[in-house]
Image: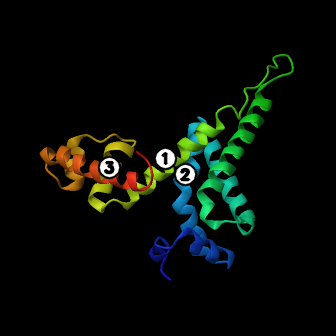
């Protein structure tokens, strides 16, 4: 099976292939959820190095525990929970490293907003999945307008997408309508 075909497989199919030792399935599963995993340490305001450490630790835990997942349709939820716990662990380790005995203070309760955090992360993942389902032109435009760290100008977008500047606004409106429809079908209003 070619690597692009792995993108079309369901989580259940990928998990089954992963459990049989298929390296391409592992790669496809990690690529599918890398943004979800990375989004959590970003919300914890971790440095790039700490976020990469969390990502690596979560991927290792996934490899170690994938066979234990009772419901392979819940991979995203498992990843959110595991990544959040890993972030809490890393934060507590960093706090121990930087706090001396003289300046010990009670650490903030990491579970205080975890449920809110988990729900927001799941909504963000649903949004990312909906954007991925958009037609290529819409997906490219939405990603450039809202997700590109460079914050490209309309002139740059016009050049990159071979689209007149005057068409960007109306095209954006149509694409956002399509995205809203996808999100409604996924239960987000």
Q: Which mark is residue 14?
A: none
Question: Residue 102 at x, y = what percent?
Answer: 85, 16
Question: Residue 74 at x, y = what percent?
Answer: 62, 60
Q: Residue at x 54, y 51 (%)?
A: 36
* Residue 187, above or below 17: above
For this view, does 5 lie left or right of residue 165? right
Question: Residue 29 at x, y = what percent?
Answer: 57, 66
* Residue 9, above or below 184: below
Q: Residue at x 32, y 48 (%)?
A: 144
Query: How far apart are labels 2 and 1 at the CA level?
Result: 8 Å
Residue assigned mark 3: 142
Q: Contact, CB < 8 Å: mark 2 with mark 1?
A: yes
Q: Residue at x 36, y 41 (%)?
A: 150
Query: How far apart are labels 3 and 1 at the CA level?
Result: 15 Å
Residue assigned mark 2: 36
Picture quarter with the C terminus: top left
Residue assigned mark 1: 124
């Amino acid at each position: 099976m070619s690597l692009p075909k792995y993108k079309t497989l369901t989580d259940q199919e990928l998990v089954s292939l992963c459990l049989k030792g298929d390296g391409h399935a592992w790669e496809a599963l990690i690529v599918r959820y890398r943004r979800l995993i990375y989004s959590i340490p970003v919300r914890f305001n971790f440095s790039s190095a700490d976020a990469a450490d969390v990502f690596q630790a979560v991927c290792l835990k996934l490899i170690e525990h994938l066979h234990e997942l009772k419901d392979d349709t819940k991979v995203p939820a498992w990843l959110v929970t595991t990544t959040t716990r890993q972030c809490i662990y890393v934060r507590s380790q960093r706090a121990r490293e930087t706090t001396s005995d003289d300046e010990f203070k009670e650490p903030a309760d990491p579970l205080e907003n975890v449920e809110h955090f988990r729900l927001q992360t799941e909504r963000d993942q649903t949004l990312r999945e909906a954007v991925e389902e958009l037609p290529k032109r819409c997906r490219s435009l939405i990603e450039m307008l809202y997700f590109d760290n460079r914050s490209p100008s309309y002139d740059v977008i016009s050049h990159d997408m071979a689209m007149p500047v005057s068409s960007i606004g109306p095209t954006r409106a149509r694409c956002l309508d399509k995205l809203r429809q996808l999100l409604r079908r996924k239960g987000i209003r």
